[in-house]
Amino acid sequence: MTQQTPNPAHIEYVTRIGDNALILGQRMSEWCGHAPVLEEDMALANMSLDLIGQARMLLTHAGKLEGKGRDEDQLAFLRIEMHYRNLTLCELPNADFGRTMVRNFLFASFQVLLWERLLASSDTELAAIAAKSLKEARYHAQHAGDWVVRLGDGTAESHERTQAALDYLWPYTAEFFAANPTDEAIAAAAIGPAWSELEAAWEAAVVPVLNEATLTVPARTPFKSYGKFGRHSEHLGHLLSEMQYLQRTYPGAQW
Amino acid sequence: MTQQTPNPAHIEYVTRIGDNALILGQRMSEWCGHAPVLEEDMALANMSLDLIGQARMLLTHAGKLEGKGRDEDQLAFLRIEMHYRNLTLCELPNADFGRTMVRNFLFASFQVLLWERLLASSDTELAAIAAKSLKEARYHAQHAGDWVVRLGDGTAESHERTQAALDYLWPYTAEFFAANPTDEAIAAAAIGPAWSELEAAWEAAVVPVLNEATLTVPARTPFKSYGKFGRHSEHLGHLLSEMQYLQRTYPGAQW
Amino acid sequence: PEYQAEFDARIDAGGYIEAKDWMPEAYRKTLIRQISQHAHSEIVGMLPEGNWITRAPTLKRKAILLAKVQDEGGHGLYLYAAAETLGVSRDELLEALHSGRAKYSSIFNYPTLTWADIGVIGWLVDGAAIMNQIPLCKCSYGPYARAMVRICKEESFHQRQGYDLLLAMMKGTEEQREMVQDAVNRWWWPSIMMFGPHDKDSVHSGQSARWGIKRISNDDLRQKFVDATVEQAKVLGVTMPDPELKWNAERGHHDFGAIDWDEFWNVVNGHGQGNVDRLAARVKAWEDGAWVREAALEHERKRAAREHQAA
Amino acid sequence: PEYQAEFDARIDAGGYIEAKDWMPEAYRKTLIRQISQHAHSEIVGMLPEGNWITRAPTLKRKAILLAKVQDEGGHGLYLYAAAETLGVSRDELLEALHSGRAKYSSIFNYPTLTWADIGVIGWLVDGAAIMNQIPLCKCSYGPYARAMVRICKEESFHQRQGYDLLLAMMKGTEEQREMVQDAVNRWWWPSIMMFGPHDKDSVHSGQSARWGIKRISNDDLRQKFVDATVEQAKVLGVTMPDPELKWNAERGHHDFGAIDWDEFWNVVNGHGQGNVDRLAARVKAWEDGAWVREAALEHERKRAAREHQAA
């Protein structure tokens, strides 16, 4: 531990990264048994597993930073909706395979950049998690990017679906980089980057692949989403009612 | 109250009727805002409301019979899955409008017969509920029956969808009439009919409408479902995780 | 010309124009636009509330919410019927909604995030709607005015139910009170914006006032709403998210802070994923239901043919 | 004829037949049927467990379940690959599954109703599967035998995890223990039936034994499973729903009650809505994914054409 007294910005920053992994991992796990080919059933389960693994490490760490004795499961299952700090993008429904792959690509490309910067975190625990997770995120970005190219530059139908997926999801990526006071404190303490710093690198990573996929990158609109600030879409509540079901129904039980 | 000491068969019988209304009312409410025409949005909301109203009276009554101080909400929201006694048919997903209407028709036709018999129940409270509910059930059966005829004897597509819906749902109707010890005790106490007694009248009510709809009545198969015995399909758990969400998340709160 | 004079005289006398009466084409178009927009708002408005029906916390609250949403469907029906008296069909109006040409009240693009939102929609959103709608009960077009009389009666019932829901939550746990305050924080400004642009920026108001469609200005209605609501908020025990909101004894009204019109226009112009999701839900319902509507028509055709055969 | 002799000799000597070797057509067909049925069972088997992934009670349990389901997908892949060595394509096999011509283990038609079912599937269903599969590790067809070696290793890991899940629940609350007992009540008889009909009623067993595909009889395997499982049940603290289940010192085995073969054949023959739902889920996944598979092929064609152009 780098500090004795809980630092709210630090807790929130780690929780936010953990919640991204948790909520997207949960979403991706819904694919189980329903993917277009068996190999993708396995790939999606595998990536979901990676994300749940990251969530476990990060929420455990957040719980320790908080110092109130909450473990990964109390944080994962027993918070109310507005205390989750994941990006809105992560909680949106899977829709079709195209939207799932476009989302994975947009998000994993962001995660790669974040983990790269967190390798040098002054929070050594976070740096260790980054080292483990970076490889996973690179694989996720590669896997999804390959699919985005295949689908974008595939049939007329697949192109249309993939463009529609990109048009739908793109406005939510503005939230990745939205400035907030937490990030300033975190950057000042050398715990990690302000996410706004990652925007240029992210676009540089993402746009060439979208071009290769023959997709049109949408223009930015004034739309703003606020998931990472705790104000979510209508979708998160439904996801949580399912995810939290057993913990809420049998309070205190051990599993 | 007709008796002082709780009679488990009586409680179960009333709970079962209440759970049918509760669970089908919950399912039907999912249509809100998504029906094929505005008039049906209203009709489905209205019938859902009727069923929720029936559930409130019946579960309140069941709670009084039980004598443990549980009210309608504790019974509706705070039981575990295997304590719900609804027919499996009621918990199946809505699927398309055709399956929804076929289900409503099969179920409401059954409810009409049951309420008719319960008018003469030795349980005067139950008889009073029957008097109020019979009119509603008749309307539901009429409404759904009209749609079954329209859809069955409509276009080629609507015929095919409606026949598929009937083929899917029909096996679950065997459960309506499955014999069980509770019903024998109930019939003996003149509280209500054993449901097995209603089979012939139900077929007589249902088959002519299906014929008019140019649908083929499926043959009986050996398939058995056991919802009214507390053993449900995979669907009920998902329905409950959503329905119970707030009560489970904020235990003891008043709303 | 002579019709026009008669029409103007009727309006000036506070009389009603009926469907069969002559009316200027612009009047007809304005009414179609306004009534259909209002009808669309009723049916799109079923979605944010519908989002909580399956999760209502008690059976009583579930029943109240179901009844309310059913009423909204009914309002949609009256209003489409009123619009149809002006020579347009419901299917045409829906087509305009689904294609994005017609608008609906952008308030329904905001998400319902907690159960408290259901109460706040009743209290603030329906409250603002009623303020807007009461003058319409005396609007110059008879069928619209009569629809509005019925609607206003039901809406004030909904408003009371919403307020009652919030009162119950405010008497509850700390978490429930936080939920209510959070919902008020999110819905206050959008409710204020429901009255539309300031009078000086309002495009349609002048002509509408002349025609007896719009009888009170946006800013006057907004002020009336703020004044009424602030008192109710006190009773409830919530704070409006506006530090500049305070009583101005000189004006005899509450002052309030500047409205973020960028936000307003972004939402109105559909720069929001809320708009995308709501429209997608309506379009999906319509497309999924196509086979049902076709079957009903085909069945009716068959039945009529059989009757004809038999005759 | 001479090939046949060589084939028989190889089998008698306990050797392996490989893909390129000559084999009787009936042997090939039997293997395709059996291997593909096994492969289908793995992928249909993802559904009942997948039903609880989103509701797993802890992150650790969610991760274990995800890994398990991923393994099952892997087993499906090995097995389809083993079947493909016999001259049939995965698409043909899937077509047979989706059209209802091919079967899969009917155990997966039963619903998973509580979290305890996930543990009981691991303990009893995987346990019975392993009993069935261990002899197949020495089956006469090399590619199948090698696939089974890998699969058996992972399956016993899954069985231990399932048992561990149940142990944790049995150490928990009264409600948790009831859930486990209820799950055991529902899964015990179906597990017993996984070994198939009694030897005297088994259609395929004689020839399969001769060919070295089936090395131990249904009833022997079933007995072995019952004997092993009864001990584990004691440690766990659950009771099997069979009043006739008891140790027979004379036989050195446990006796058990009569199996309800009507139930067995009803489920095997798809007289069950479980079968309808599982197949519908697989068919929907396949149909929903058609555009993705087409896009991948088309993209590959385009890419190859561009490379050709460039060369």
Image (tube, coloured by chain):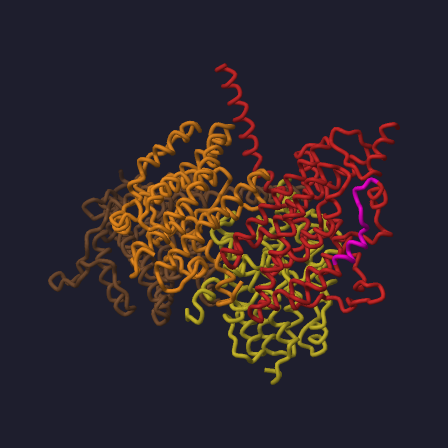
Chain colours: A yellow, B orange, C red, D brown
Query: What residue appears at the point 75 percent right and 60 percent down from the top-left corner?
Result: C226
* Viewer-proximal residue among A212 and D88: A212
Residue A88 lies left or right of residue D44; in this view the side is: right
Residue C57 spot, x, y in % from top left: 52, 59
* Viewer-proximal residue among D158 and C174: C174
Query: What residue appears at the point 51 percent right and 23 percent down from the top-left corner?
Result: C303
Which image quadrant for residue C174? bottom right
Number of numbered discs: 0
Outermost residue on the bottom side: it is: A4
Residue B83, can we see it?
yes
Which image quadrant for residue D52? bottom left
Residue D115 lies left or right of residue B39; in this view the side is: left
Q: Is residue C167 magenta?
A: no
Which image quadrant for residue A226? bottom right
Residue C47 spot, x, y in % from top left: 61, 49
Q: Does the magenta stretch include residue C215?
A: yes
Residue C80 lies left or right of residue C226; in this view the side is: left
Residue D78, can we see it?
no
User: What residue range appears in magenta?
Assistant: C211-225
Residue D182 spot, x, y in % from top left: 32, 60
